[in-house]
Image: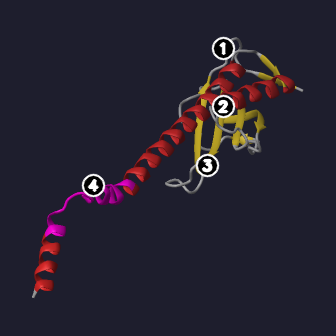
Amino acid sequence: MLRRLMLKRALKRAGSDRRGSAAIEFALIAPVAILLYCGFAELTMAMMAERRAAHAASVVADLVSQTPTVSSAQMTDIFNIGNTIMNPFPAATLKLRVTSVTADVNGVPQMTWTKVSGGASPMPPGAVAGFPANLLASGDSVIQADVQYAYTSPLQMTLPHALTFKDTFYLKPRRSPSVTLLP
């Protein structure tokens, strides 16, 4: 009987004791909070990488459109500027393509020349597929810069696979009707 009474009092005391409840609540909430924090951090870094890749393509197109002629050596330097813009993100997966597109007498956009960096595929000769309608009139020219960037999160907790970002920019040549590529 005494044992039963002591056991009853001990259970009653344990049921009303709240000293460890905060630790238990923390143990239940902490993994979710950490996962949310890491997820927001990874998402923010991915958005920054996407903006840097788009900015790199924009700057590359802008630099090419500022001159009437550009050499292959100058294109290499311009692509290096694009890679530098990606810092602190690695530029190894940055693919840039710059293409001069000119509309023929019928207003059909044709590839005039193309240069690539980072393993990007050159634009095939001939008519340009997927070009925005009514962007060029007959004889007009535009510089098209395409970017592709594969972002891999350093944490890989909530983004375990690489995200691929793509963007295209169109800029009219500033000092001449078209930009000529020199060897």
Q: Main secondary structure of the magenta part?
A: helix
Earlier in the chain: of badge 3 and badge 4, it is 4
State which quadrant residue 72 falls in.
top right
Q: Secondary structure at mark 2?
A: loop
Q: CA distance from mark 3 to mark 1?
A: 37 Å
Task: Identify which residue is drawn at 53% across, 39% down.
Answer: 45
| Residue nearest the observer in this picture, 166 or 157 | 157
Q: Secondary structure at mark 3?
A: loop
2 or 1: mark nearer the eye: 2
Earlier in the chain: of badge 1 and badge 4, it is 4
Kindly identify the amino acid type of the residue bearing the numbered disc 3: Thr
Q: Badge 4: few (under 14), some or many (20 or more) residues near its Cα, within 10 Å?
A: few
**Residue 174 badge:** 1
3 or 4: mark nearer the eye: 4
Earlier in the chain: of badge 3 and badge 1, it is 3
Q: CA distance from mark 4 to mark 2?
A: 43 Å
Q: Secondary structure at mark 1?
A: loop
Earlier in the chain: of badge 4 and badge 2, it is 4
Q: CA distance from mark 2 to mark 1?
A: 28 Å
Q: Badge 2: few (under 14), some or many (20 or more) residues near its Cα, within 10 Å?
A: few
Are the residues at dot 3 and dot 4 in contact (C-beta closer than 8 Å)? no
Span of residues in magenta? 13-30
Q: CA distance from mark 1 to mark 4?
A: 66 Å
Q: Which residue is mark 2?
A: 87
Q: Which residue is mark 3?
A: 152
